[in-house]
Image (tube, rainbow, N blue to C red):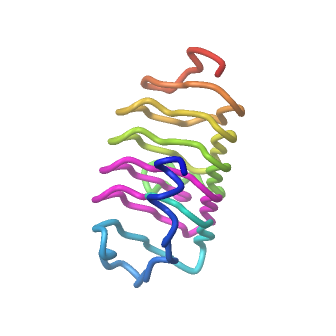
Amino acid sequence: MKEIEKRFRDWKYPKIEEGKLTKWNWMVQNKEGLVLGKRTDIGAFTYINAKHGVEIQDDVQIGSHCSIYSFSTIDGKKGKVTLKRKCRIGSHSLIMPGVTIGENSVIGAFSFVNKDIPDNVVALGVPAKVVKKT
């Protein structure tokens, strides 16, 4: 059995309370707008604002200290954020409203993602840009 399969064999949907840290120290505001897939791994101190919808599909991994915004109070942008199956988001990254991260794609640590990222690529930087296909 692969290591990842062992790790998530007993995965259970997390208890999410509005504006409170989960058991794993990540938080959701506007939790009614969150759709969370199975076998997700969300790092400590990640913040998710799901006011206009956040969909995190199956097998997504999100590093610690990330921020996912479906609404920005700075410029008023709003829109659903979608993290497709098996994508991975490096720690300290920021995902802006209306962005979709493609299936199997990897976002490098400390990246600022303000545009859609296609499937099967590695993207990183400020702003995030595709650096290679996987």
x and y percentages locating residue 19 in the rendered image: 36, 78
**In this rendering, position of residue 51 left or right of residue 124:** right
Residue at the image position 64 percent from the left and 61 percent from the top: 55
Residue nearest the viewer, comparing 106 with 55: 106
Residue nearest the viewer, comparing 38 with 84: 38
**In this rendering, position of residue 112 left or right of residue 80:** left
**In magenta segment, residue 50:** yes
Instruction: Give the quadrant of the C terminus.
Output: top right
x and y percentages locating residue 122 in the rendered image: 56, 25
By secondary structure, the bulk of the magenta-drawn segment is best described as: loop
Q: Is 37 drawn above or below residue 17 in the view shown? A: above
**In magenta segment, residue 47:** yes
Residue nearest the viewer, comparing 1 with 111: 1
x and y percentages locating residue 98 in the rendered image: 64, 49
Residue at the image position 62 percent from the left and 50 percent from the top: 83
Q: Is 133 drawn above or below residue 35 in the view shown? A: above
Give the residues in magenta: 42-71
Q: Is 71 drawn above or below residue 62 in the view shown? A: below
Residue at the image position 54 percent from the left and 51 percent from the top: 1
x and y percentages locating residue 18 in the rendered image: 41, 82
